[in-house]
Image (cartoon, rainbow, N blue to C red):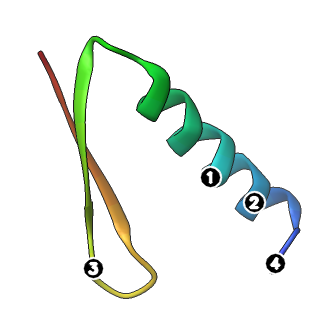
Amino acid sequence: MVNDAKTISIRNFNKNLMEDKRVSISMVPIGDGMTVWQKK
C-alpha cells in the first residue's frame, strides 16, 4: 500500500465524501480510479 502524502490526502478526501450525506458518489474504473460526486 502506498503511503505518500498525496495518496493519503486522496484517501482522506474520498473518506470524507463517503461520510457526507449531502452528496452521491461513484468510483469510475479509469486508470487508478476516479471519484465522481454530485450534490443531492
Q: Give neighbour class at mark 1: few <14, some 14-19, many 20+ (Cα, 10 Å).
A: few
| Picture coordinates of residue 1, whole percent (x, y) | 80, 80
- Residue type at mark 1? Ile
- Residue type at mark 4? Val
Residue where numbered disc 2 is placed? 6
Marks 3,4: beta carbons within 8 A: no
Name the secondary structure under disc 2. Answer: helix
Distance from disc 3 to disc 4, alpha carbons, whole Å, reads 18 Å
Name the secondary structure under disc 3. Answer: loop
Question: In the picture, residue 22 is in which quadrant?
Answer: top left
- Residue type at mark 3? Pro
Earlier sequence position, callout 1 versus callout 4: 4
Residue at 37% over, 88% down = 31
| Picture coordinates of residue 5, whole percent (x, y) | 86, 58
Instruction: Give the number of marks.
Output: 4
Marks 2,1: beta carbons within 8 A: yes
Question: Looking at the rendered structure, which numbered label has been put on residue 22?
Answer: none
Residue at 28% over, 82% down = 30
Marks 4,2: beta carbons within 8 A: no
Name the secondary structure under disc 4. Answer: loop
Earlier sequence position, callout 3 versus callout 4: 4
Does 11 sit left or right of 23 as displayed?
A: right
Distance from disc 1 to disc 4, alpha carbons, whole Å, reads 11 Å
